Structures are given as structure tokens and as C-alpha cells.
Amino acid sequence: MEGGGDFSVNAIRGSLREAAMRRGTRVLLFEGGEPGRSRRPCLVALVLLVSASGCYAPDFDVVIVGGTIYDGSGGEPYVADVGISHGMIEEIGDLAARTAFETVDASGLAVTPGFIDAHSHAEMDESWGSHGQEFLTQGITTVVLGLDGGGPFRVAERLDAWDRNGLGVNAMTFVGHNAIRREVMGLDARAPTDEELDRMKALVRQGMEGGAFGLSTGLFYTPGTFSETEEVIELAKVAAEWDNAIYDTHDRDLGATFQGVGYDASVAEGIRIGEESGLRVIFSHFNPQGANNYGRANVGAQMIEDARARGVEVWAAQHPYTATQSNLRSYALPRWASGGGTDAVLARFEHPDTGSILRTQIMESLAMRGGPEKIMIVDEDPDLNGRTLAERATEWEISVPDAVQRIIESNGNASVMNLELYDIDNTRYLARMDWMMTCTDGRTPSDGQAVTHPRVYGAFPRKLRQFAIEGDDIAIPFAIRSFSGLAADFFGLDDRGYVEEGRIADVAVIDLETYRDVSTMEDPHHFSEGVVHVLINGVFAIHDEERTGVMGGKALRAPWTHSER
Ligand SMILES: [Zn+2]
């Protein structure tokens, strides 16, 4: 894959500038060397530290001149200059006569807020993922993590580790129901005892006190799937002690769950949890799944509209791909067969009472997803990566259920994509909703991972290009708003998300002519194109289309206050 690379000069330049800005001083760099003679340029840094009262104090650290500002509000774009100092957007207007340490010519380019990935699996906890370059190259400066029930309850520790280790993008997290349930009850397929419910509530509280933005669930996944709605409401009420906190739901059943509750009931459940607990709701990657739900996006959208009309705050996020990514067990196994650990799952394949019904139901379960030829294995394990489940079974000369069993035996589980699970016309329809944010739902690939979902590299440019530039489903300012201001409003990031005086300088400069996703299903490891500059907290993360390597992101803690304090 692309990545790494030699960005030493830019890294040094950025670090010096950042260090100076943090101290309220300014830095000038003069670079020299022998171009063409040496791969490693000699950096002659003549550093002039000039205090505010010094001999030369330009008006701004950076001025972005002549760009067309899409400010994140959804309003008409306008041409103006943007002056940035001390990590903030200090002034917007005609700044041509003003001085700056660096002037960026943005004529003919769009100047936008840094984008907010409302549902992300950026690997910020891993040294190989914390640079966030797959995201920065789309213009994303903030990722929302801890979703699908997967967020930790040791939230304070996670945020502190991010601060300590450095982040390429801003990151925030939810506390995850699945992580909590697993800690307290293991993978048991039953309701909690009163004592267990109390322990789970304490862990929700621990997560919220640590800075979580709310509670996330993945009722589609093990062990969340064993929970009744009432259990989630009880836990959500704990998070709701923090004013404006959020419930993020990966639905129990988006329409392709074997023996599930169905799409409509699942949307109703998510709304009910918000309504009865008092949390504001966001539906993760909202879109009905499976061929039975093609053309039915209006049903879920109407349920959200009805809820909003009676005062429940319900929002959603989407990505523009028709394939999903999850894991083999969740897609192939009926719920009754997924409880317990790996040994318990494998025993059900072997047991005379359950083996044959399990094999039959694996095929029925896969049929709802388009069959085993639509299940593409994208696991880190190179022996599995890059083939469909159907191809694997044929190669191994065994049945599809036996191939599922073999993968669980050898690997425990496997990351898989489900091709063509979404209907693109549903996605287009939903893109028009004024409560629809944008997400990648993308997981940073590890180095050995040949095939991965291209959404991690390209969801934002793909949505803009398909629906606003080439298609006419939505206007460009509306799309940019769904990337930025809308999410900032929802997540309470009232100091980010807009190109507006007084906001933190998370800013992207984008060439809309060339802004496009390059990664495909067949060839997925390419950064998107067209992002010329990205400033994150006022520091260049991308400069003249080059990644600087600066770790300019911050761990974001929820701004909510506890109502009893
Ligand atoms: Zn997800």
C-alpha cells in the first residue's frame, strides 16, 4: 500500500511551526541544500522567534487567499480570504494587504471545513494507523470512533493514550455496549441479572465520566444481539444523565439478518431507545440491506421524519458504497449458533442435534446476502484475503458451510465484505435528507492486508462526485454540510466544523475538478486525489498535496455536562 514515505522536511517544518504556535510565538524557516544532489535535503533552518511585541509580527500565521468558501452551513459559496493564527480562524474577508508567514493561493479551489467522519474505524490505537492518512487525503480532520457497540469503557485511558502517542486526525469515542456486556457477562445468550445490569450501568458511567460522547450499540453483533431492548434503554438512561449525550445505533437488523426482526422493526427499536432514554439518536451507516429492501429507503426515512416531528432528535450517517464490511460469523451464522466462545460455536457444527440444521441455516443466512459469491474475504490473514467464500469452498473442495467451519477453526473469524448489499438508489434517496451526515465506516488496513474495503480511502470524494458533481441528487454546499457543519452541530463540536471566525482551524483546500476516490474493490490501496491542503488545529497535515506527517490531531472529550452537577 501507499503510505509511510519520506516527508522529513515537511515533518520538521510542520513540527517547528506547531511548536512555535503552541508557545504563542512565530517561526520562519529558510530552507537550503543542494537540490538534485542528495535525496536527503539539507535543512538550514534559520529560526526567527518573534514574540507578539517583536520586530516583525505578521498579521497571520497562514492566509488562504482567493478560495471559494463552502463554510459548512449549506449556504451559497463565496470568495474570500481566510486568516489563521494560533490554530484558529481569526479573520475572513479581503486580507490581500495583510501579512502572513505563509500565503496559500487558493484561486479556483474550494475552501471547506475539515470533514468529520461520523462513523469511523480509523485505527487510532495502533502505531501503523494513528497517522490517519487514508482519512486526511479525503479532507477528513475528525473521526468518530467506538461505534457498533465496540467502544471501550476505559474511555479516559483511551483518550489519554491518544494524547500521549499522537494523532494524525482529531478523534473522539463512544462507550460501547458490546464491550461492557462482554466484560460483565462474557458471550452468554441471556438477559443480565439485576446485579449484572448494575455492573454494566457502572461501566457506562465510567465511560461517560471519561469523556465519551454517548453510548453505542451493535445489536446485530455478538453479544449485543442477545440483549432485549429494555436492557439497552436502562443503560442508555445512565448516559442520558449527561445533557445532550448521544445514542449511536448499529441496527439489530438492517434487513439481511437471518430470522431477524426486520428492517422496519429495527429502525423503530433504535428510535424507541432514544425516545425512552432521552438520548439523541444517530443511525450508523443508515441504509436498508438486501435485495428485499431495494427501493425501500423511504420507509426508514419516514420513520425518522415522524420521530423528529414529535420531538425526538434522530439523525443518521451514510457512505456511498453498495458493499458492507463486517465479519464472517456475523454474516453467516444464525444467532442461536453464535453464542459462547469459538469452542462452543464449533461444537454446534459437530453435534448430531445441531450440525445439519446449522449447515442448512448458514446457506439460508448467506442467501439473504446474495449468496457466498457475494462474501469477499478481506481478512488480515493473507491465506484468506482476496477470495470470495464461494471461491474458497471450491478451492478447498468442500461445501460452503464446511468452509465457514474451517475458517472459524483456523482463524476464529474473518473480516469479510458483503458485495451489493445496498441499493445505490436507496443511498441517493437518503443523501437528500437534511439529517444525513457522512461517514467512511472504514477500518484502516494493516500492512499485509491486500484486499480491503475502498471506503476507507474514498467515501467522502465518492459521495460528492456521485451525488453532487456528476449526479444532481444534492447540491455541493449541501454535501459539504453533510461532511462538516451538520456533524459538528450534532456532536456538539461547537468550535469546529465551519469556516467561520473564532472556530478552530480544521480547514481543507480542495480542487473540486480533481477531487475523486481512486480505490476500487479490485485495487483498493490508493489515496483519494484533489485535496491540496489540510490544516488540522492550524497545522498543515497536507501541504501542496503532500502529506506532512505531522501528528496534528487531538483527543476530543465530550462537552456534555452531568445534569446532577
Ligand atoms: Zn461500523
Image: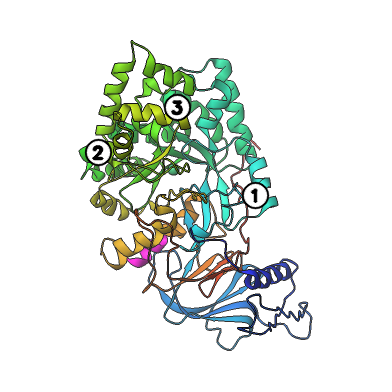
What residue do we see at 46% from left, 34% from top? 217
Residue 453 screen position, x and y as percent: 40, 50
Q: CA distance from mark 3 to mark 1?
A: 35 Å
* Precedes in sequence: disc 2 or disc 1: 1
First to last magenta residue range: 475-481
Q: CA distance from mark 2 to mark 1?
A: 40 Å
Indicate yes or no whether the magenta region holds residue 326.
no
What residue is shown with label 2?
Answer: 370
Residue 220 visible here: no
What residue is shown with label 1?
Answer: 162
Residue 12 screen position, x and y as percent: 68, 70
Determine the main secondary structure of the stretch shown in magenta: helix
Please indicate whether residue 268 sits to the left or right of residue 343 in the image. Answer: left
- Disc 3 marks which amino acid? Glu
Residue 426 visible here: yes
User: Is 520 drawn above or below residue 211 in the view shown?
Assistant: below
What residue do we see at 47% from left, 24% from top? 342
Residue 409: image tag: 3
Asked whether 470 or 205 is in front, the reply is 470
User: Is 278 drawn above or below residue 123 in the view shown?
Assistant: above
Check disc 2 and report its element: helix, strand or loop: loop
Quarter of the view holding residue 51: bottom right
Quarter of the view holding residue 26: bottom right
Observer-side mark, 3 or 1, equals 3
- Disc 1 marks which amino acid? Trp
Give the image quadrant in which the ligand numbered 1 is located: top left
